[in-house]
Amino acid sequence: MAKRYYCYKDFLPFAVMVTMECINVGLNTLFKAATMKGMSHHVFVVYAYSVAAICLLPAQFISKRSRVVPLPPLDFSIICRIGLLGLIG
């Protein structure tokens, strides 16, 4: 049991971080190659977001989280926080 907990707590975040950095480098390389061949920046962004959405779509079906827990009510303070994060980001 302790070995499994070690994997989830220490190794899995590191592996995900390394994988995301490799994907980022690959995407930057593809972007440079595509724009040098004449592709518009906007078209590349649409293609990249489409592939990301298709890759993330099955995640909702294999997630083990409970879907029974209701979301908290959307009140004014939450809307203000979302707006503040939008301005900061």
Image: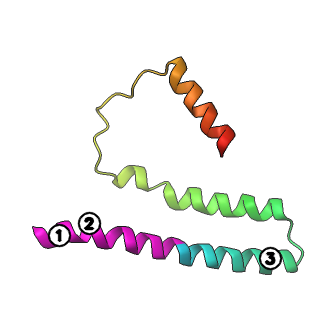
Residue 61's disc number: none
**Mark 2 neighbour density, 10 Å: few (under 14) some (14–19) many (20 or more):** few
- Is residue 19 within the magenta segment? yes
- The residue that appears at 47% across and 76% down in the rendered structure is 18
- The residue that appears at 66% across and 58% down in the rendered structure is 49
| Amino acid residing under circle 2 | Tyr
Q: Nearer the viewer, residue 27 or 37?
A: 27
Q: Where is residue 47 shown, x and y percent of the image?
A: 71, 63
Which element is circle 1 on?
helix
Q: Where is residue 76 shown, x and y percent of the image?
A: 54, 18
Q: Quadrant of residue 34?
A: bottom right
Do the numbered discs 3 and 2 sit on residues whose CB atoms are within 8 Å? Answer: no
Residue 8's disc number: 2
Which residue corresponds to mark 3?
Answer: 34
Residue 4's disc number: 1
Q: Residue furthest top?
A: 76
Name above or below for residue 6 compared with residue 82.
below
Do the numbered discs 2 and 1 sit on residues whose CB atoms are within 8 Å? Answer: yes
Q: CA distance from mark 3 to mark 1?
A: 42 Å
**Mark 1 neighbour density, 10 Å: few (under 14) some (14–19) many (20 or more):** few
Q: CA distance from mark 2 to mark 1?
A: 7 Å
- The residue that appears at 61% across and 72% down in the rendered structure is 24
Q: CA distance from mark 3 to mark 2?
A: 37 Å
User: What colouring style does the render use?
Assistant: rainbow
Which region of the structure is painted magenta?
1-20
Q: Nearer the viewer, mark 3 or mark 2?
A: 2
Q: Main secondary structure of the magenta part?
A: helix
Q: Nearer the viewer, mark 3 or mark 1?
A: 1
Which element is circle 3 on?
helix
